[in-house]
Amino acid sequence: MNFELPYDETQYGLQTMDLVLDLLVDPAGNPQLKDQEGYAQAVARGILDVPVDLEEEAARVLRELGCGRGPFDPSWIDWRPDPGWSTPVLPPGLRLGGAAWSVGVELGDQSAGGLAAPGVGEEFG
C-alpha cells in the first residue's frame, strides 16, 4: 500500500501527493512498514507537513486486509481492462518535453534523461 493524500480532480486529471511511506503485505497477511526514515527526513526538511499516525493507518489497512476490502479485494486478482478501451494520450503541454507536468510548474533541465523539478522552497509560477 502506498500512503498518499486523497487525490484532487483537476481539468488535466488527478493530482496526487505521495507521503513516502509504504506498507508491504505478504500473501500470508504479514505487514511490513517501509520507508519510515525517508518519511521522517521529508518531514524534518519541510517537504511534507502531513502528520501520519503510523499505528492508526497500519491498523486501518490491516482491517481492510482482514475484510478483503480495497486493494485486498480478491476480485482484483482477475481484473483486466476492457479490451475496447483506448490508450489515453496526455495533452501536448503535459507530455515529456511539453511545457509542464503540472499546471504552473515548468520542467527543469532534462539533458540528463530525467526530470529536474524546481527546488524545494521555490515559488511555482
Image (cartoon, rainbow, N blue to C red):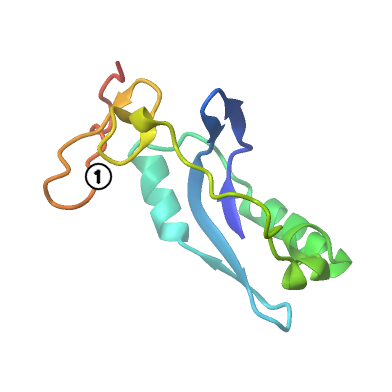
Q: Determine the residue positioned at 15% across, 39% down.
A: 109
- In the rendered image, residue 33, in percent from the top left (x then y), is placed at 56, 66
Please indicate whether residue 9 sits to the left or right of residue 103 in the image.
right
Q: How many marks?
A: 1
Viewer-closest of 44 and 94: 94
Q: Determine the residue positioned at 80% across, 60% down.
A: 64
Looking at the image, residue 5 lies above or below residue 41: above
Q: Determine the residue positioned at 36% across, 31% down.
A: 92
To which quarter of the image does residue 120 belong? top left
- In the rendered image, residue 103, in percent from the top left (x then y), is placed at 40, 23
Please indicate whether residue 25 sits to the left or right of residue 38 in the image.
right
Image quarter (top left, top right, bottom left or bottom right) of the C terminus? top left
To which quarter of the image does residue 110 belong? top left
Looking at the image, residue 39 lies above or below residue 109: below
Image quarter (top left, top right, bottom left or bottom right) of the N terminus? bottom right
Q: Which residue is mark 1?
A: 115
Viewer-closest of 91 and 31: 91
Label 1 secondary element: loop
Q: Residue furthest right?
A: 67
- In the rendered image, residue 21, in percent from the top left (x then y), is placed at 51, 55
To which quarter of the image does residue 25 belong? bottom right
Amino acid type, residue under disc 1 in the picture: Leu
Q: Determine the residue positioned at 39% across, 55% down.
A: 38
- In the rendered image, residue 77, in percent from the top left (x then y), is placed at 74, 72
